Image (cartoon, helix red, strand yellow):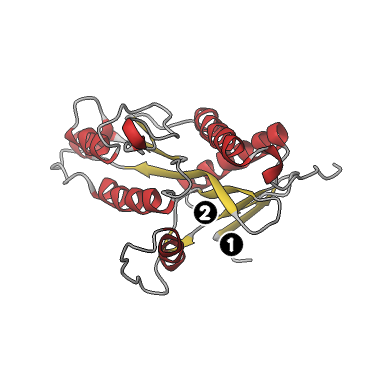
Amino acid sequence: MAQKDRLRLNRYGTVINVTSSKQEIELAEAMLETSEAISAKFGYQLVHHKRVMLSSIVESLRATYPTVEFGDPLATSSMNPDGGILSVVSADGTRQHPILITEVKNQGTNDLRLDEGLKKQAMGNAIERLGKNVIGFRAMMLDEGIIPFVCFGYGYDFHEGSSIVDRVRTIAMFGELNRVNVVPEGDDGKFNRGSFFFRQAAWSRPEMVEVMSEVATRAVHFYISRYGEKAFAETTPSAD
């Protein structure tokens, strides 16, 4: 295995595979802790994927919405959320229902540049990329009826009063930040927002685990109410 790759296997069988950037490793460790907690709580089999192919999303959308036209993406195009996608497996093994999709964004060094006497840099690149992914995941989750997406953002650009924070609020469909949103809100569930936790200070692993566990728990409860408790594959922890 290449050194840049990191492969983890928890005692419930969930594989976490991420690259070794510092923020991704921290998020991956939080994902690992979350998957263990969710496995122990519900006893369901979980799987983790680092990416999802756009062609697979379009194929699923076409099957679900046959009267709607969709364009064909390149066969190699994908979305690669920083922490990957954690899903619960159906009892017959034919479906995987996402319960947690995670991103982490660090943006802003202008505080350091000002200390060094340098000019400010333009803000917003990481947030523009985030917006594209959120649109894709909202489309992917349309048939499921929930949006178990959470992004943790930190850095100088997200200080109180920054206009960049309003860009995040726009991506969040003008919802409140630092709040868990899994089930769509409003008439007919039009506001499928997702969860956006943003501030200047970095997020600790325990803080991320707390939020991620709540998102995943709400998602599993939603699927149970929709499909029933017996609709998902069970797993038995291996001996230590």
Horizontal side of residue 166 vs 38, given as left or right: left
Q: Nearer the viewer, residue 100 or 92?
A: 92
Q: Residues within 10 Å of mark 2 (few under 14, many from 20)?
A: some
* Quarter of the figure with residue 152: top left
Q: Is residue 3 above or below residue 182?
A: below
Q: Is there a contact, CB below 8 Å, between mark 2 and mark 1? A: yes
Q: Is residue 17 left or right of residue 79?
A: right
Give the secondary structure at mark 1. loop
Disc 2 and disc 1: Cα gap in Å? 8 Å
Dot 2 falls on a residue whose secondary structure is: loop
In the foreground, 165 or 121: 165
Q: Quadrant of the N terminus?
A: bottom right
Q: Nearer the viewer, residue 49 or 64?
A: 64
> Which residue occupies 41% across, 31% down?
181
Q: Quadrant of residue 95?
A: bottom right
**What residue sits right under mark 1 in the picture?**
3
Disc with the residue nearer the chain's start (2 vs 1): 1
Q: Position of residue 206 (x, y in %)?
A: 55, 28
Q: Which mark is residue 193?
A: none
The answer to whether residue 167 is left or right of residue 224 is left
| Name of the residue lying farthest toward the left | 119
Taking the view exactly as shown, the residue that stands out farthest to the bottom is 75
Q: Of the numbered discs in the image, which one, if any, rests on residue 20?
A: 2
Residue type at the position of mark 1 = Gln
Task: Tell me if I can see residue 154 in this picture.
Answer: no
- Position of residue 166 measured from the top left corner of the image (x, y, whole percent): 21, 34
